[in-house]
Amino acid sequence: MWTFLQQLSSPPYFYQLAGRLIPWLAWPCLAFLISGLYYGLWVAPIDYQQGHSYRIMFVHVPAAWMSLFIYMVMAISGGIALIWHMKLAEVIAASSAPIGASFTFLALATGALWGKPMWGTWWAWDARLTSELILLFLYLGIIALNSAIEDKRTASRASAVLGLVGIINIPIIHYSVIWWNSLHQPPSITKFGAPSIHLSMLIPLLLMAVAFKFYYATVVLMRARCEILERERNSHWVGTLITPSQNS
Amino acid sequence: MNEFFQMGGYAFYVWTSYALTLLILIANWIIPLKQHQNLLRTLARKLRRKERDHVDPNP
């Protein structure tokens, strides 16, 4: 196990491994995405209260889950990078930030598009919405730190500290609908006991959630490969990687 | 079929949400793809230049 971890943290090995893994993650992603869209838009029945507008849930909820999940991945790999100075953890943290920011933006935007017809407003300054907006600002702060500091390793340390401090926001987002009176509905999947959602609506929701997980795995590896190439541009292995393309 | 596109009057909200989702998914996939191609190209060019500078053309 330890030797595997050591091998994995070697940039050239990880670069090759990620390249081989990407198609195995991308194709399941596409399959889950297409079936999720089919079940969500076509098969799932109309909601008796919200009509067809509830179908926004199938993209809104998985996007919001991803915004929290990616933040945790980013903050934890940032922490690992801080403690053990592992280059690979820095790379994963830096590559996750823009993807997490995208999903946070998507959760907020689809939330507004769902809020307008259902609540009569695009936006409300309530606990859930505001804490999710703060999450977006945390992501943007981390992206800004990463690009503002010239030295990549210093940048990673600075953004890791910000990421770890920002973890405090994650339970606040999750419990905001329980702690405060909110316009936003409480969670219907993760509460204890049986989920209060019908199976025909649960299936597309889970399909989309799995699709988004595979999607994140695919694109984070794609970004990580770029990040590694850039950081290791002067090393010998990158030189030998480039050389074959010279002859063509 | 027509009813499917109208989404019971919520067409604008539902379709904008799904369009936005697809846009973001595609963008986040294209960006690293292009970046990777560009990086390989720039690094190869740099390497060629370095090698050319090291070899004296007129010995």
Image: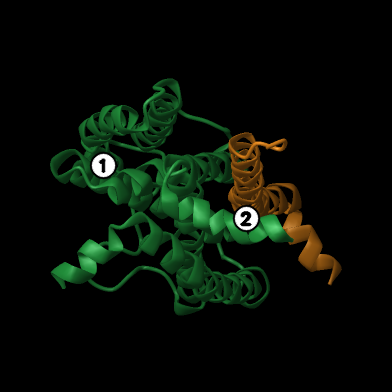
Chain represented in green: A
Please state which of residues B16 and A125 is positioned toward the viewer in this rendering: B16
Tell me: A15 left or right of A112. left
**Residue extending farthest right:** B2
Q: Which residue is mark 1?
A: A78
What quarter of the picture does the C terminus of chain A occupy?
A: bottom right
Is residue A81 visible in the rendered structure shown here? yes
Is residue A192 visible in the rendered structure shown here? no
CB within 8 Å, label 1 to label 2: no
Q: Give the crowd class for mark 1: few <14, some 14-19, many >=20 residues within 10 Å.
A: many
Asked which colour scheme the image uses, the reply is: by chain
Mark 2 element type: helix
Mark 1 element type: helix
Residue under the image location 19 percent in, 46 percent down: A80
Q: Amino acid at mark 2?
A: Ser
Residue under the image location 34 percent in, 33 percent down: A127
Query: Where's residue A216, x and y in %?
Result: 47, 58
Colour chain B is painted in? orange
Query: Where's residue A140, x and y in %?
Result: 44, 29
Query: Where's residue A106, x and y in %?
Result: 54, 44
Circle nearer the N terminus (1, 2):
2
Q: Quadrant of residue A192?
A: bottom left
Q: CA distance from mark 1 to mark 2?
A: 38 Å
Q: Quadrant of residue A138?
A: top left
Q: Amino acid at mark 1?
A: Gly
On residue A53, which mark appears? 2
